[in-house]
Every structure is written in structure tokens, then in C-alpha cells.
Image (spheres, coloured by chain):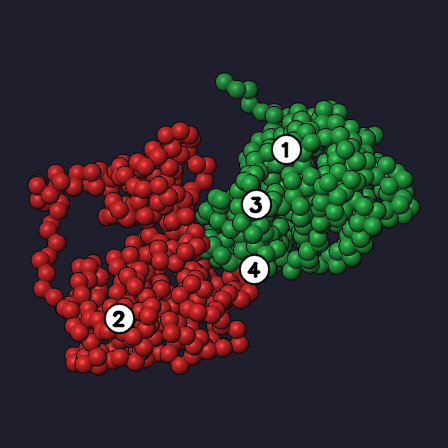
Chain colours: A red, B green
Amino acid sequence: MKVTIDGIAVEVPDGTSILNAARIIGGDIVPPAMCYYSKLAGSGGKCRTCLVKVSKGSEKDPRPMPKLVASCRTNVMDGMEVQNITSPEVIEARKGVVEMLLINHPLDCPICDQAGECQLQDLGFEHGAVKTRYEFDRRTFNRIDIGDKIQLHMTRCILCYRCVYVADQITDHRIHGILNRGDHSEISTYIQAAVDNDFSGNVIDVCPVGALTDRTFRFKNRVWFTKPVEAHRDCDHEKCNGKVTLWYKGEDVLRVTARKDVYGEVEDFICNTCRFDKKKTADWVIEGPRKVSHHSVISSNHYDFVPLPVVKTNPVLKEANKEQFERETRL
Amino acid sequence: MGRKLLLEHINVPGINTFDVYRSKGGYASVEKALKTMSSDDVVEEVKKSGLRGRGGAGFPTGMKWSFLAKPEGVARYLVCNADESEPGTFKDRYLMTYIPHLLIEGMIVGSYALGAKTSFIYVRGEMMPQIRILEKAIAEAKAAGFLGKNILGSGYDLELYVQPGGGAYICGEETALLESLEGKRGNPRIKPPFPAIAGLYGCPTVVNNVESIAAVVPIINEGGEEYAKLGIGRSTGTKLISAGGNVAKPGVYEIDLGLPVEEFLYSDEYCGGIANGKRLKAVVAGGSSVPILPANLFMKTINGEPRLMSYESLSDGGFVSGSMMGSGGFIAFDEDQCIVRNTWNFARFYHHESCGQCSPCREGTGWMEKVLHRLENGHGSMSDMDLLVDVSKKIEGNTICPLGDAAAWPVASAIRHFRDEFEWHVTHSSEATSRNYGIAHYADPLPKPEPAA
């Protein structure tokens, strides 16, 4: 299957979604995704940030698709041509979606544990407007403790349903879902039944915002003051391979999470024992510091790195990045 | 006086019972279909009739049926969408209350055509009396041998079930309906796959409106070509219109498609004009989801042609100066009605009924509702109109299901056509709470269109 995204062609196997095809290409043409999670079947299609324009359906049927489509849930066809950042329509729609996602979000980043590794923060920074046009009260909820390890702060939730899919697919029995409808719908465990399960902690990792946080880490530190280190241990849980990221502050392990890739998705889900109960260096075999993107606030002050080359003044790089420059001027 | 196909015997006493219905020629189409026609013949006949879905979108029913996947060894289902909850529409409830056997007859023929052995009627939860009526009618039909095993000795088996819904507007969307029917939360599914490939329990499924299924009965009785002679152009047959609002005689009327709107609105046979001798200000032609039109644009298209009650004529002019047939929920507004208040009322409905799955609709409907509420109560500002249009544009087309479009269209069209009234609500905010804007120029004759250069 050959698909062209923003003028860049790529060969992908049958059944690949447009989003995953774009991730194979990589770079700035990858649509942002707030609800899609490649490790959770059925996720995606809800947040609408990954909307793209299909300007040519396929080689057989070259008609464009009438509406923008959710790239995470639309599979590629042979000869499909997709416009993401080259389409002003897509940019406009995405701006609208980001605005919608933020109107009921408290924007309490200064006191939110997720700040610094929050996908909504990144999305708002990259695609949002500086000011909001929303002049009404925002939706608020009381904080709820889901068991003794996880806290749910619904006010921050963007209803991506990822944690619901985790409850469905990763944990053994589901006592976690959505109540109510529309903008008053909420994630709930129904009368606060504690989520007590070996894998329940993964809802924290999949949450793109600060709605589900680790109670053993809450208000302990800002993530950019901690230092991510890759480590593993021989976990005796059959479904857990014990590969994690430890977040150090000085000598102390403040937090344990699964290893997240560049799209904020975990590589492997980890069990609650690894996540919550093993917080000594002696429990782990250290592999080395985790590489974090230079763009992330987490990497600030930690490692020496070569400053980004000044692309715009370097003739060699300018030639190499010609295509990207052209795209930017077109916008 | 048009011919009545669906409501021909509606005034016969006891037509809701099996015996009276049968004595008036009921269940003849079942006999005809099962004894003399193959299932493909039935589909072909419906295709020939040109019947278009009566639930709102107007997709040809015969085409929909022929798209149904037919893999070996997998069950197929016919589901009747009786989750009628569009504000302004009450035709399906009327049909189910007074002549339930017509629907059941249509379900048997439809199920036979699609090869479904089990069929469902998904009824909105609030319609408890209708659910009881349908249950009783099914029991009567079963006792008479029209349902169950080996119907009329043809070897065809069919079980028909009534499923009450939870009373959610979103469950009228076909994939949300299927989710709800499966016992899950009624969230629309992401398409593709379409229900014709993977619907109820992952099996190929056809979902049809009550009226579409009922219309199959006269099509089989009289033949598709005969049915197609009624109506105009691609809008064939008859349509039930639920006339409401400020008309003199509200109610459900069966019209031949292609009837001039003027005749429908003012003749004594139908609506009988505007109540209390007032003047018409605006019309919502097909249920709350379709664009609202001022009286002058509704009676005549932008090119000065009189408008007809048909799918094509009502949508003449597209979104700029047209509306849609929708589900046939005809709401007339007289000169004393406030369009801002009405728009807010519709927005409030969509805010309440949004399922909350995808973000533009979940957040946008609430936002529009709040802005409109502020406008209606005299706290708006001039920039609110542009804001509303912009928000509605951000919702429209960017959602999983058509509810987002349905929420955006009434707001966008009201501002397009009634901007003066919205602005008056801002400039005369204290007056707006005590008095209405009135009819203004909304019924004035349209200016002659510029001749095309």
C-alpha cells in the first residue's frame, strides 16, 4: 500500500491507519492524538485532534472524502493522498478542537502533577490560541480517591476513554467506566468502589492529562526536577516484564512508571507491585539514563546536549530541509 | 386530495386490533411476498419504488437493503428505529399507537427480504404505551400464524422483539441504537464498518425508520412502479408530516411528496393556516435539526419558484437559502415567536443530548447553549453572533455522528437569516426580555434575483 501524506510517500502494510503511516514517516506531519493508544484496541476517534483531509481516496476511487476524517481510525488505501499540515482546513479544525478541549479544562498546570509531561499541555502549546473565547464557569468535580494508590480529578479529564479501555483490556475485571452524558459525563468507579487490581496503576500512565495521578507521587516534586533512569527487575507477575523508568530526585526513587515512547505511549504495561511498592534502588537493575527529547521540559538541566543547529542560517541544512521550509511558508 | 397509503384506514374503529386490520386487507403484503415472491424480488420492488428513508437522511431504502452483506452462516438482522425523539416529530408514535399492525406487517416483509430470522423494534423508553401496544399486536400476529415458525407454510421463521430504549436522543443514531440494543452505553460507533457489514452483535444489520418500514407494505401490495408514480422527481410516494407549532390544525398528515408548501400550510385539508389569524414568521421544515427558514424564503426559493414539500425542493438553495426534508417535523412560528429563544431552546436540547464521546460536540453544544442563553436574557454582546457561527463551524462535520451537524445547523441558520433579531437582543437588551422582535421583514417578498451575467 502506498500512501502519500503531505507530499511524502510511504509504503505501509494493509490495514495500517493513516496516523500510524504518518508515524512511520515521523516528524512534524504526524497528527497529534489525545485519545488514540496503539496498545489499546478500539481506542481513538473521540478527541478529533488527529483530523486530516483525504484529498484522494485511493488509486481505484480517487474521489476525496467529503469530511475530515479521524486519522487514527481510518485505514489507508492504495494510492491514498492525505493532507495534514498542508491543509488550512485541517489546521483550522484542529485549532477548534484544541479550543473545545480546553474550555472545560481548569488550566491549573502550576499545581498539576502532570505538568511537563502532559499531552494536552503540549497540544495547547503547539496548536492552541493564546486566549480563550470562553467566558463561562468551567465544569468542576470533587477529587475522588480510587483505592489508596490512584486519585481521580475529573475536572482535568478530557474524556479520552483510554483508562476505560485499560480497565476493559488490561485489568481483570472492570469496575470503571463513564457515567452520565455530554459535558457532564464523568469517569467513575461507581460509588467509589476501589479499583483493586494488579494492573490498575496503568490508568495513570495512559491518562494524557492530570486527571489520574499517582497518590504515592502527588505533590512530591515537579517532573522536570526528577531524573528518569531506565531500570528493570525480575518481576514474578506473569504478565509483567518489569521494564520501567525510575524517576530519581537525588538518591531517592520518587516514582516508577512504564517506559513511554515519543508519542507518550507505554512500551509495556507494568504491574502495581513494580509501580507502587518497589521504590528502592536496591530493588532494581539500573540500565542507564533515559533519553528524553530535547524539546521536553524534562530534559532541561539534566544532560549536556549539543544545541540544535541553527537550521535557517546553515546552507547545507537549508538544502536538506527544503521541503519542510516550503511547507511552512505555504501555511 | 392526495391518496392515503399508510393512514388509509386510520379512522376505522378498532384498527389497532388484528381482526379489524386483517378485514381491511391487512397482512396481504405478507401473503403476497412469502407465497409469490423471492426475497430478492422484494428488494427489487422496493428499489423500483424509489422509497427514501423517512428518518431524516433520505437515503434510498432499496439501496440500503441491497448493500447488506450476506456471508454464509452469519445471522442478519433488521432493526426498526422507533427511537423517535427529534423535537417537532411525532409521526412514528402516531403510527405505532393507532395502527401498530402496519409496522409489524412491514417488519415481516422487510425481514423476509433481508433473510433476517430475528428482528427488533427499538422503541424510545418514554413511549411505554406504544411498547405495550406493539407487544399486544405482536402477540396477536403470532397467534394468527404471521410470526414464529413456518409463517403461512412458507418455511420462513421470524421472531420479532420490542426493545425499550433508555430515552436518549442519541440512540436514534443507528450505531448508537445498536450499541444500546446490545446492552451497552449508547455511544455512536466509528464508521466504517457500516452496520450493513458489521452491525448488531457484529452481524450485518439494516436499521430503518418506522415509516420506511411501514411504507414497504403499500409498495409490495401495489408494486414499486405504482408507488413511484406518486410524488415528484426522486421524492416518490407519500410522507407523514408532523405539523406543529402555531398552525391552526396541528397533527400528523399524510401528503404526496411534491405538494406545494403553500397548500400544505394554508389549505383546510392540512394545517389550515396560522392559528388566530396571525402571520407566518419562520418555519422549521423537518424537525429541529434542519436549518430554520424565514417565511419569505420558505414559501419561495431564492429563484422565485414556489417551494414544494419534497426532498429536492426543500433543500433547494443548499445551506444558504434552503432547508431539508429531515424527518418531517414541520414547526411553524407566528409573528409573536422569538427566534433567539427558540434557537436557545434547540441548543439546550442538543447540549442535553450530546453523548459526550467526541470533544467538539461535547464541549461545543454546551458553549453554544450558554452563549444563546446569555443573548436571550439580554446579556449578550455584538461579537456573540460571530462567535456562535464560528463555534458551529468548528463542530459541523468534525464529529463521529451527525448529532454535531444537527446541533450546528439550527444555530448557524438562525443567525444567517435572523441576524437583525439577534442584534436587536443586544442593542435593546431590556426591551428584549419584555417584548418580541415581531415579524419585521421576514415575510416580505424576496427581491428579484439578479439575472445571471
Relative placement, left or right, of B394 versus B418 is left
Say if residue A22 shows up in the picture. yes
Residue at the spot of label 3: B74
- B33 sits left or right of A37 in the view: right
Query: Which is more N-terminal, label 4 or label 1?
Result: 1
**Residue drawn at x 50%, y 53% as measured from the top left:** B361
Q: CA distance from mark 3 to mark 1?
A: 21 Å
- In x, y percent, where is residue B255? 76, 34
Q: Residue at x 59, y 56 (%)?
A: B182
User: Based on the displayed image, in which of its 4 quarters is residue B102 positioned?
Assistant: top right
- The reply to whether label 3 and label 2 mark residues of one chain is no
**Chain of residue at mark 4:** B
Q: Amino acid at mark 3?
A: Val
Mark 4: which amino acid?
Answer: Lys
- Disc 2 crowd rating (10 Å Cα; few below 14, some 14-19, many 20+) is many
Q: Which mark is residue B165?
A: none
Q: Quadrant of residue A305?
A: bottom left
Q: CA distance from mark 1 to mark 4?
A: 29 Å
Picture coordinates of residue A3 (x, y %)?
A: 31, 37
> Residue B221, image x and y in percent?
78, 31
Q: Which disc number belongs to residue B62?
A: 1
Q: Secondary structure at mark 2?
A: loop
Callouts 2 and 4 on one subunit: no
- Judge whether residue A329 can be spotted in this image: no
Give the secondary structure at mark 4.
loop
According to the picture, the residue beneath numbered tag 4 turns out to be: B184
A244 to the left or right of B368: left
**Residue under pointer 2:** A242
